[in-house]
Image: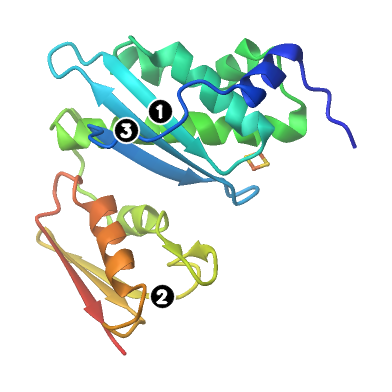
Amino acid sequence: MTLPYGKKLLEHFKHPHNVGVIKDADAKATEGSPACGDIVTLYLKVDEKTHKIKDIKFESYGCASNIATASVITDLVKGKTIEEAKAITWKKAADELGGLPPIKMHCSVLAVDTLRSAILNYEEIHGLIKDKKPTSRNEILDRIKHVMNPIRGEDIVKTGTVQDVIFEKGNVTVLLNLEEDNQFAANISEEIIEQLQSIWDIKKINIKFTI
Ligand code: FES
């Protein structure tokens, strides 16, 4: 089946803008699409005084629609403040590309969700969250779902690598169904810490191996 892609979408897919990694990024986020399992990572450099996005780059393991949407949103938000960037919707990104086939809308949602997560990561790191509500155990689990089990190719909550999460008085303990000397133990631990460390009411993260 050939999907009805427009000229602008194909142009962004074939020659995507702002692809790559920012090594000293001020914030980053990785999101996966529940609809297709594809993944996008987005990196931000932000001016600390004006909160304007100075640079933005992305890596996508998604389809043509996702690459094109990520490319177009990086163009749209460069030079904008993080508040202006937050106002960009997947619909606006899709319109910018001249429309997307309906079965591809989730690809645009994935790109915009990743942008929002990267902005949230920036706000958390820089203490900019205004409405600070206590973080729940379920919110912690949602963050940990961003960490993949490299053998199964699915997240570590879904694959049962996470046995339990305990959150008490600012201390999080993540119990992993892994041996400490498992070849992926160090990587998985690092990624869990990366996901949780910017949350305002988490003071300490303990990873425990239960096998
Ligand atoms: Fe997965 Fe498009 S089909 S991002």
**What's the CA distance linking mark 2 and mark 3?**
30 Å
Mark 1 crowd level (few <14, some 14–19, many ≥20, 10 Å Cα)? many
SS of the residue under disc 2: loop
Residue 115: image x %, image y %?
A: 41, 29
Is residue 184 shown left or right of residue 175? right
**What's the CA distance linking mark 3 and mark 1?**
7 Å
Identify the mark nearer the N-term, 1 or 2.
1
Identity of the residue drawn at 38% across and 20% down: 86
Identity of the residue drawn at 28% across and 86% down: 210
Disc marking residue 22: 3
Is residue 104 shown left or right of residue 209? right
Residue carrying label 1: 57
| Residue at mark 2: C-beta within 8 A of ligand 1 | no
Vertical position of residue 193 compared to residue 26: above or below: below
Is residue 93 shown left or right of residue 23? right
Asked if labels 3 and 2 touch by Cβ distance under 8 angstroms, the answer is no
Identity of the residue drawn at 66% across and 30% down: 65
At label 2, the amino acid type is Thr
Res. 26 image quadrant = top left
At label 1, the amino acid type is Lys
Identify the mark nearer the N-term, 3 or 1.
3
For the N terminus, the quadrant is top right
Residue carrying label 2: 161
**What's the CA distance linking mark 1 and mark 2?**
31 Å
Residue 69 in sight from this viewpoint: yes
Res. 206 image quadrant = bottom left
Asked if labels 1 and 3 touch by Cβ distance under 8 angstroms, the answer is yes
Mark 3 crowd level (few <14, some 14–19, many ≥20, 10 Å Cα)? some
Residue 89 in sight from this viewpoint: no
